[in-house]
Amino acid sequence: PPQSFCSSIKDDGWFTIFQLVLTLVTLPLNAVPFLGQYVFARINGLYYAWELHQSYMVANGIRSTGDQLALCRSDPFYAHFGWVALLVELIPVVGLFFRLSNPAAAAIYAAENEP
């Protein structure tokens, strides 16, 4: 239905703006060797995992941003998955490989945890 598509775009727009602001605010942490990247990935990990799984959630009827975030926060492994996925993307050269393979890993994770 057009209405749900439009609300999804609206929710995606706010999510994208929030994620961009969060990334820009925490970006200076990367100037600190090792510890900075760790903290950056910890802060942004939950939202990165959410980004990787968002199309899966919409396909399964979870369209509300609040419902999606509640689902993400209810699983303690979820934030850990996003943290590791973001952290491996920060590795020079091989990070590109992980950037391409993380969506596949997110799909496998979602398939394994589907009721």
Image (cartoon, rainbow, N blue to C red):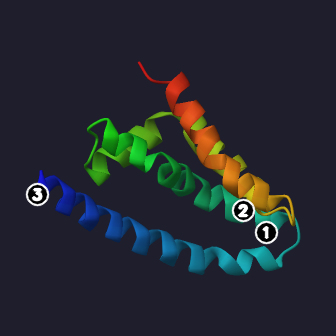
Tell me the crowding category of disc 1: few under 14, some 14 to 19, or many 20 or more residues within 10 angstroms, Cα based: some
77 or 85, which lies in front?
85
Identify which amino acid the numbered label 2 is placed on.
Val
Of labels 1 and 3, the one closer to you = 3
Task: Give residue 68's quadrant in the image.
Answer: top left
Residue at mark 3: 3
Residue under circle 2?
39
Residue at 87% from the left image edge and 65% from the top image edge: 93
**Kind of residue sitting beneath label 3:** Gln
Q: Earlier in the sequence, mark 1 or mark 3?
A: 3
The answer to whether residue 79 shows anywhere in this view is yes
Out of 43 and 90, give the one closest to the viewer.
Answer: 90
Describe residue 51's horizontal placement relative to residue 7 as left or right.
right
Q: Say which residue appears at 66% left-offset and 56% top-offset.
A: 42
- The spot of residue 49 in percent (x, y) is 55, 49
Tags 1 and 2 in contact by the CB under 8 Å rule?
A: yes
Q: Secondary structure at mark 2?
A: helix
Where residue 79 appears, as percent x and y from the top left, is 58, 45
> Which numbered marker is on residue 36?
1
Q: Which mark is residue 20?
A: none
Residue 38 in view here: no
Count of number-bearing discs? 3
Q: Is residue 15 above or below residue 1?
A: below
State the residue at coordinates (18%, 63%): 6
**Element carrying mark 1:** helix
- Residue 48: give x, y in percent of width and height: 56, 56
**From the viewer's perspective, is 45 left or right of 21?**
right
Q: Position of residue 114 (x, y in %)?
A: 45, 23
What's the CA distance linking mark 1 and mark 3?
42 Å
